[in-house]
């Protein structure tokens, strides 16, 4: 099931969401240049310099040198992507769900939420594999936080999704609760399945997805509890005074 768009209107242009997408695309273009100039070794060096390496991050903190260069990679890694599919998938989810969360939270709070969600995602993956020397890259963790918040704030929003039925496919409008709930269950299954596997290192950071999503759910619950994300009876959010 691949979400294509939602039927959840926004009140203002999602400037932050657009800026985040632009920043990720720009970083990807830069990485392509590094790959072209370094014949493959250039992009690898880029990932090792700006990607988050759990073992090196923990070593920096244990040595009392934090926050330092390795700590900064928690943020820089959020804008790097391995390939066009990796980038395209993350940006599609960010665009579909991020604009509504920005609209509900407000622009500056959304920036803080996005970064904190990315930090939570990184912390979850580092906790699972603290000795890893493989760079973690991608906006998946921060985007997962966006998905978690969306699930809490807009559970009944209709998501136009591409559903595959064997060799056939169909476009169906599905509630966000189903789309995002199923996505999270799949992350849990894949994450648990990857534990202890020798080939799991260097693959998908499932626990970053899980950690980011849980952080987003917590933010969404708190936000709704403050009365600023409570939906109408029809599932649409109430007006908010967030600027």
Image (tube, rainbow, N blue to C red):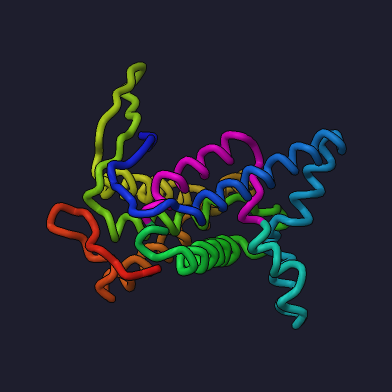
Q: Which residues are magenta?
A: 77-100
199 in the magenta segment: no
Q: In which quadrant of the rendered image does the N terminus lie?
A: top left
Residue 166: percent from the left, percent from the top?
34, 20
Residue 69: percent from the left, percent from the top?
77, 68
Which quarter of the picture shows residue 78?
A: bottom right
87 in the magenta segment: yes
The residue closer to the viewer here, 193 or 97, is 97
Residue 213: percent from the left, percent from the top?
42, 58
The residue closer to the viewer here, 153 or 46, is 153
At horizontal 70% and vertical 53% (from top left) the residue drawn is 134
As drawn, 32 above or below 18: above
Residue 7: percent from the left, percent from the top?
28, 42
As drawn, 110 above or below 183: below
Q: In which quadrant of the rendered image does the C terminus lie?
A: bottom left
Relative placement, left or right, of 184 versus 196 is left
Residue 120: in sight, yes or no?
no
């Amino acid at each position: 099931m691949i979400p294509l768009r939602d039927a959840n209107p926004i009140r203002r242009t999602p400037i932050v969401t657009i800026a985040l997408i632009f920043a990720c695309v720009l970083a990807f273009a830069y990485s392509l240049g590094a790959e072209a100039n370094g014949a493959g070794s250039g992009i690898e060096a880029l990932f090792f310099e700006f990607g988050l390496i759990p073992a090196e991050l923990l070593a920096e903190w244990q040595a009392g040198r934090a926050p330092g260069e390795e700590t900064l990679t928690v943020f820089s890694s959020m804008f790097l992507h391995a390939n066009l599919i990796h980038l395209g998938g993350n940006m599609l989810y960010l665009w579909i769900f991020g604009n509504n969360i920005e609209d509900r939270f407000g622009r500056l709070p959304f920036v803080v939420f996005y970064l904190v969600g990315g930090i939570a995602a990184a912390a979850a993956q580092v906790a699972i594999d603290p000795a890893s020397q493989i760079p973690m890259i991608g906006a998946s963790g921060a985007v997962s936080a966006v998905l978690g918040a969306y699930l809490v704030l807009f559970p009944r929003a209709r998501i136009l999704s591409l559903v595959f039925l064997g060799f056939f496919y169909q476009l169906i409008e599905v509630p966000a609760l189903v789309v995002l709930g199923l996505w999270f269950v799949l992350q849990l299954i894949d994450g648990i399945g990857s534990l202890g596997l020798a080939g799991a290192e260097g693959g998908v950071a499932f626990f970053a997805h899980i950690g980011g999503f849980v952080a987003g759910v917590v933010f969404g619950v708190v936000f709704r509890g403050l009365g600023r994300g409570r939906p109408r009876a029809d599932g649409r959010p109430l007006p908010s005074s967030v600027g």
